[in-house]
Image: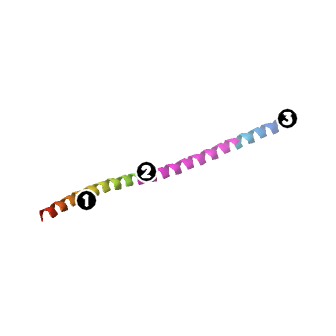
Amino acid sequence: MDNEILMGLISLAGAALGTFGGILVSNRLTVYRVSQLEKKMDKHNCMLERVYGLEEGQAVLCEQVKVANHRIDDLERKH
């Protein structure tokens, strides 16, 4: 009977260690994947900021072109 109890305790310890090890590995993988997603989001956010800057610059340039066209029209009317 002592051998059966000893084998049961060894089996319990092995199962507990295996479960704990699996949880640790799974947790590390999850943390790694989340950090990779955060890096991708940072790149995406930087790209969006650049696009917004380009759009603002384009709006300024369009306004400058409109002003220049009005000046050209005014000069053509005078001559």
Decide: is 20 above or below 50: above
Give the magenta range: 19-47
The three-letter code of the residue at mark 3 reads: Asp
What residue is pinned by disc 3? 2
Name the mark nearer the viewer: 1 or 3: 1
Q: Residue sitting at 47 percent across and 50 percent down?
A: 41
Query: In the depicted view, which residue is nearer to us: 38 or 53?
Result: 53
Q: Please state, as top left, top right, bottom left or bottom right, where the C terminus lies in the image.
A: bottom left
- Label 2 and label 3: CA atoms lie apart by 64 Å
Q: Residue sitting at 16 percent across and 64 percent down?
A: 76
Q: Report crowding for label 2: few under 14, some 14 to 19, many 20 or more residues within 10 A (C-alpha).
A: few
User: In the rendered picture of this protein, how many numbered marks are placed on residues?
Assistant: 3
x%, y% of residue 20?
A: 67, 41
Query: On the rendered structure, is 19 left or right of 74?
Result: right
The three-letter code of the residue at mark 1 reads: Val
Q: Residue sitting at 25 percent across and 59 percent down?
A: 65
The three-letter code of the residue at mark 2 reads: Asn
What residue is pinned by disc 2? 45
The residue furthest left is: 78
- Specify the quadrant of the image occupied by residue 47: bottom left
Residue 29 is covered by the magenta coloring: yes
Name the mark nearer the viewer: 2 or 3: 2
Query: On the rendered structure, is 7 left or right of 31?
Result: right
Mark nearer the N terminus (2 vs 3) = 3
What residue is pinned by disc 1? 65
Q: Residue sitting at 22 percent across and 60 percent down?
A: 69
Q: Please state, as top left, top right, bottom left or bottom right, where the N terminus lies in the image.
A: top right
- Label 2 and label 1: CA atoms lie apart by 30 Å
